Image: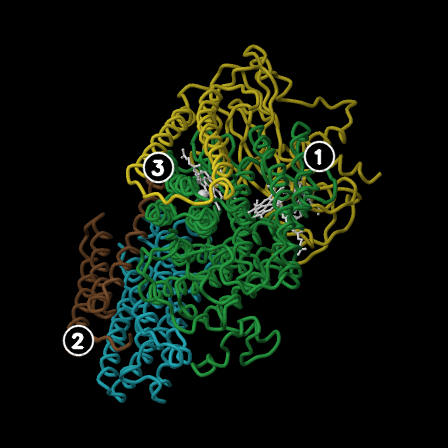
Amino acid sequence: MSASTATASEHVSFLEYKGKYKGILGWILSTDHKRVGLLYLYTMLVFFSLAATLGLLMKLQLIAPGYTIMGPQTYNAMFTVHGIIMIFVIVVPGLPAVFGNFFLPLMIGAKDVAFPKLNLASWWIYIIGILVVLSSQFVGGWPDTGWTFYAPYSFRTPANVLPALFGAFILGFSSILTGINFVVTIHRMRAPGMTWFKMPLFPWTLYATAWIQVLATPVIGITLLLTVMERVWGIGIFDPNLGGDPILYQHLFWIYSHPAVYIMILPGLGVISEIIPVFSRKRIYGYKAIVLSSLAIAFVGYFVWGHHMFTSGMSGRALFAFSFLTFLVAIPSAIKVFNWVATMYKGSLNLQTPFYWAVSFIFVFMVGGFSGLTLGSLAANVHIHDTHFVVAHFHFIVFGGTGFSFMAALHYWFSKMFGRMYDRGWANTGWVVFFAGFLTLYLPMFGLGMQGMPRRYYDYLPEFHAGNIISSLGAILMIAGAAIVIVNLVRSARHGEKTSEKNPWGGKTLEWETDTPPTFENWEDIPSVEERPYEYK
Amino acid sequence: MILGASTFVEGVNNAFLFILVIAVIIGTGITLTMLWFIYRYHQKRHPKAVQIKDSISLEITWTVIPIILVMGMFYYGYVGWIPMKRPPAEGINVTANARMWSFNFRYENGRVSDKLYVPKDTAIIINLNAMDVLHSFYIPAFRLKEDMVPGLANNRTWFEATKVGTYTIFCAEYCGLQHSYMLSEVVVMEPEDFWAWYEDPDAMVVEVTEDVNLALLGRQVVERNGCLACHSLDGRTLVGPTFKGRYGETITVITGGQERQIIYDEEYVRRSIYEPDHDITVGFRPGQMLSYEGEITEQEVEFITEFIKSLNE
Amino acid sequence: MSEEKHHISSYTSHFLVLGALLLLTAVSVAVTSLEMGKYDTLVAMLIAGTKAAIVLTWFMHLRFDNKIYAIFTVAVIVLFLLVLYITFFDYSYR
Amino acid sequence: MEKNTEHTTHVHRDDEGDKLGMWLFIFTELLLFGMLFLIYAVYRFRNPVAFQLGGEELDVFIGTFNTVILLISSATVAMSITAIQRGNKKQALMLLGVTLFIAVVFLVNKYFEWGAKIEYGFYPGSEALMELGHGTILFFGLYYVMSGIHAIHILIGIGLFIYVVRQIQTEKIHSTDYIWLENTGLYWHLVDLIWIFLFPLFYLIH
Ligand code: HEA
Ligand code: HEA
Ligand code: CUA
Ligand SMILES: [Cu+2]
């Protein structure tokens, strides 16, 4: 690790670099931020496939009313595990853990993150958390509470929810550690000359995200812990029979989980802010506005949690305040969208796969965002709360937002990460099928929700059949698209065309100045920065 | 959107439409602009990008305009919602009881029903009462939804139906295994019909026993009270033990932590219904089944017993 | 970076701080016997808040360290108080 | 913990960074306990009388005693940092020894306090408690949870102190490299900080 080995490892990429350990140990015990990032990526791929398969099975069950392929207990367990994995294992750590780890140090000109060992530890904690969640399969069956674990059902259900609660609690630690790591890295390790307002936008969003991770995650930690205690000892805090208030549980849950949705989306917004200028060959429009809007989202996002509880029996005044704040929190997102579009204006657009993902991101993000506004409106929410409209909203914005930006980032940075280029033809085909499948799958759900089909329904009345058929067929189309995209990427990572081109897209941020793939400690000399990012001439 | 049949419909629909219109206009606008840029400024047609300076006034414009728009959205949402929170002083009071996984409705004169019967154009004030976990009282056609929270005092909602007809009531808050089967109906009638139903003397003192099949009556009671969500009639174990082939058997239960053998007889059935946690059948959890004290009469217990007995044949 | 100057607090100052904290504890215990009705909690919290501020400023060195820590700490406390305040939008008007 | 000595000595040592990391960790702790205080506030607001009566069940003397010794231990930690900065290893070790001792005494006190309550039949889920009103159940539920989680933090603190003492003995921590001690100190002050609020909220309400 010391400076002397750095000379020996000159021009050896981090993928081939030989450290203390060999083989797989060289990965799972490596503190190199790039390897940790890839570890997260592989783990996520595995569990995403698992949870996505559960999603598909649910859609198959819903293709017709009544029993089609599973019973209600299985269905309930499925959306619970699907939700827990998708939220706590995939999209919350998502972009920060994979691309944040890999690219944050590269983009700010550092050799690693501030606490590399802690970084590795957070991956291990993450793995342990996942295993604990999944262990429920073997100790009393999968939980059946939904990912929200609402009291009092979560301590009255006969299913064993303890492993899931505990697992999610552990996953929270991993998230906190990543957050601490990033804040310190960004404060202390920026390259000489990189002032705050010369920092690229992706690190900026990571910074905002990291603060939410640090300040919101403990809330869910203590909430889940209390639920565990409630179930084991009956302390009464959320149990109405003992004087507790179930609505207080919801407050605590959403005090975390609303900010958490911005943990999911902010880094995605950052990625898009990287991609749009690069493929437009243009300076980003409104750099400062975008930075400030990220911080504003992070801050205001703390005070809108109550919009998940509009029909919960909360006081009218609280509803009023939460609805008002919810509308305010939409403004910074609007600012970003306008600035992105303005960036394309009079650019010189280079149409590549990452750019397709980015543009389709803007589209689905808009649809998701507008449906969010509908949900934020008091009167409308009363009708569509807890229906498939909500399901459509969050798949649009979580899967469409975070998922699409994840895909965009993967394609954008692919060659830097693996030293190989993906097959562009397949990548574009995959995107088309995926996008089409996505719309077919989730658009009908808006209709179903407006008609009044509640969510978490194993079975439904015949009047909801039409929408469900289309949606289920869409799921199949989408799986096909996703399979093309993923198989193409997995194949290309192993056999794709080799490249050591440092800067295939003509980006202006620091990560494009390192070798492809980067060497073990990224830089021989830490670069120094004079210009603002994205200064195209 | 779907048909509407209450006084809230207009407010909700307006809020919805207002947002929808803005969303469609801005959404299509932005999408078309992007597509146009993609076409017009494609590398081939526009090889050299033109760098433009940021403009503060533009940033302010597209901050202020959305703020105005969202305040409009907030306003419509607020206006549509206000009446839901202001039940009138006069109206018919009904208590809606929810438990896993059925609703029932109790009227002021003591009449209990598993469907909600209401007169048209009259305010109905519903006291929401959840007995075990969260449920939610949802009538899409009325644009009405309110969670039923155990232990929450003053948990009320109200509505005024405007069209005669039958509409579905859903439970919209996840409440376990049979959540999707926790349905009921609201029947909106002309006021005369309603009052006739309400004061129907036969409804109160139902059964004149002679020549009626008690087991059949029992079956009705069991169906009406949602027992079948947890107890099967064919030997399968659902949430609770099956009803089939149990009557008269010697079974093992846990009473106050002690295992003991008892006979499944009428006395046991009565205790199971009124004090379910007194004897817990081995292999099941206490606290799942709630007491039906005050909801199922002694007479009905008799019917249920006959019904369970009849399943032995 | 690690060569920055460090402030070294004297033992005397630590003793003074401790003395102040103990004094406030004593006051806090003593006041409870006065019946002040609804101001009880307010007074208790004010005293506790003062003690907390003392611990933060001197024992935890916020006064001498980089200002950023103090700013962050205040921001976090404000955030918490806002969350608490907003929660009571519900409970005060139910 | 936040830092690792090996890495910092080889590649780059950044005491400020380590301290920032510790502060961030403290913020997470503040919010974690903050939420418990929020729950407390809500339930006290809804059950004022029961909370008052509950408070009278707790022994003010033990509470005050624990407060006083915890404050003293905070001072000794702070002083041990001064000692290390001045290069006075022996004094630092002695002061840390006092802190450790106090931490243990605190736990012993807690043990007896809890023990007496549990013997009395007052613990979550106990029959005696269930017979009392909802407010009382909540008061004692919160009392056990909050002082329990606080006690766990004391335990972790004891572990940290033992580690730090060993590091001082082996000269890994010395007058120019004492960030571990400083961070442990910060952590300990946090534990104190929380107790400063727990004490009046549980023992002093009337
Ligand atoms: C990535 C995650 C993510 C993001 C970013 C958002 C963003 C938003 N969400 Fe969403 N939400 C979820 C994930 C997310 N949500 C999840 C998972 C749930 C369900 C949880 C569960 O119950 O299981 C949920 C549920 C949910 C509800 C509760 C629904 C219910 O149960 O009744 C509400 C209600 O207000 C809501 C609102 C919003 C709003 C207003 C935004 C805003 O931030 C959106 C802002 C974006 C835009 C507005 C679009 C872009 C702007 C323009 C194109 C410019 C023009 C704009 C204007 C004129 C304003 N969301
Ligand atoms: C990131 C978040 C995320 C993502 C991506 C998805 C993806 C999908 N979800 Fe998800 N969903 C949630 C988060 C997510 N979901 C949450 C939080 C809930 C709420 C849970 C609750 O109520 O508690 C929910 C609930 C939910 C429901 C509602 C259940 C109900 O209320 O009754 C349904 C129903 O259709 C559904 C379906 C799907 C489907 C079909 C997909 C599909 O789109 C998945 C598509 C994925 C692919 C197409 C990838 C396929 C790839 C492969 C199979 C691998 C091939 C692999 C290799 C070659 C390596 N989800
Ligand atoms: Cu009752 Cu869902
Ligand atoms: Cu939200």
Name the residue carrying label 3. Answer: A321
Name the residue carrying label 2. Answer: C15
The answer to whether any part of residue A439 appears in the image is: yes
Quadrant in the picture for residue A116: bottom left
The mark found on residue B79 in the picture is none
Chain under disc 2: C
SS at mark 1 in the image: loop
Query: Can you tell which chain is drawn yellow?
Result: B
Q: Position of residue A439 (x, y in %)?
A: 60, 37
Q: Is residue A407 above or below residue C56?
A: above
Name the residue furthest right. B313
How would you rate the neighbour count of disc 2 (Cα within 10 Å): few for under 14, some for 14-19, many for 20 or more?
A: some
SS at mark 3 in the image: helix
- Which residue type does callout 2 highlight? Phe
Query: Considering depth in this image, is C64 or A135 the residue closer to the camera?
Result: C64
**Left or right of A192 on screen, residue B189:** right
The mark found on residue A65 in the picture is 1
How would you rate the neighbour count of disc 1 (Cα within 10 Å): few for under 14, some for 14-19, many for 20 or more?
A: some
Chain under disc 3: A
The span from disc 1 to disc 2 (Cα, nearest Å) is: 75 Å
Q: Colour of chain C?
A: brown
Q: Are marks 3 and 2 in contact (CB under 8 Å)?
A: no
The span from disc 3 to disc 2 (Cα, nearest Å) is: 47 Å
Mark 3 vs mark 2: in front? 3
Quadrant in the picture for residue B101: top right
SS at mark 2 in the image: helix
Query: Considering depth in this image, is B209 or A392 the residue closer to the camera?
Result: A392
The answer to whether any part of residue A243 appears in the image is: no
Specify whether disc 1 shares its chain with disc 2. no
The span from disc 3 to disc 1 (Cα, nearest Å) is: 40 Å
- Which residue type does callout 1 highlight? Pro
